[in-house]
């Protein structure tokens, strides 16, 4: 069955779900980290608000908006940087949470980059196939 906007190829679908899953993981990790697991202050901190910007691209990823995949692949590096800095400077639980943040950021970036690349490849292949039939 040929791919269509309603039925994208399996590789594109896989990267979409990896991106959504890692984004949701980052949101949950950010909230849990700053509210319960290892907050900067006992009882939680306002740093939990760092999860809010991560909620905005969720709808765009689910709707397969190419623009969203592109800008998320850039924004994720802010969270990656925070994870690296806190993995280096925090101790104990905070260090492990920071390493988890780094891993989720790398998964999200990889998924977004692959998603964009695969979709562009499928569009070029479809255009070439259409040109060959005319």
Image: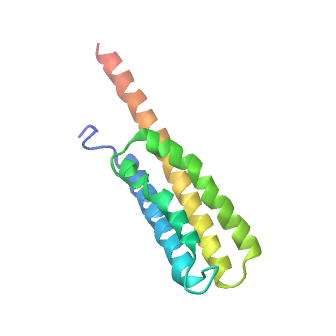
- Does the rendering let one see residue 47? yes
Along the viewing direction, whichever of 125 and 80 lies nearer the viewer: 80
Q: Quadrant of residue 18?
A: bottom left
x, y percentage for residue 32? 50, 77
Q: Where is residue 92 shown, x and y percent of the image? A: 69, 85
Residue occupying the far top of the picture: 134
Residue located 55% across and 81% down the image? 44
The image quadrant where one finds the C terminus is top left
Q: Where does the image place residue 113, in percent across and percent down from the top left? A: 53, 46
Q: Residue at x 26, y 44 (%)?
A: 7
**Which residue does the image show at 68% across and 59% down from the upper left?**
81
Q: Is residue 80 above or below residue 86?
A: above
| For residue 132, side relative to residue 83 (left or right) | left
The correct choice, above or below, for 86 with respect to 122 in the image is below
Where residue 87 sits, quadrant-wise, is bottom right
Vertical arrangement, residue 128 with respect to residue 15, above or below: above
Q: Nearer the viewer, residue 116 or 73?
A: 73
- Direction from residue 72 to residue 132 in the image, left or right: left
> Residue 121 or 6: which is nearer the viewer?
6
The answer to which of 4 and 81 lies nearer the viewer is: 81
């Amino acid at each position: 069955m040929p791919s269509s906007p309603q039925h994208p190829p399996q590789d594109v679908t896989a990267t979409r779900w990896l991106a959504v899953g890692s984004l949701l993981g980052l949101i949950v990790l950010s909230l849990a980290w700053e509210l319960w697991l290892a907050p900067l202050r006992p009882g939680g901190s306002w740093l939990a608000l760092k999860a809010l910007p991560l909620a905005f691209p969720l709808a765009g990823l689910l709707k397969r908006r190419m623009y969203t995949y592109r800008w998320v692949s850039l924004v994720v590096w802010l969270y990656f940087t925070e994870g690296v800095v806190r993995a280096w400077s925090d101790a104990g639980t905070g260090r492990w949470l920071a390493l988890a943040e780094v891993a989720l950021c790398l998964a999200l970036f990889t998924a977004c980059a692959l998603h964009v690349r695969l979709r562009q490849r499928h569009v070029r292949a479809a255009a070439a196939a259409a040109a060959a039939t005319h």
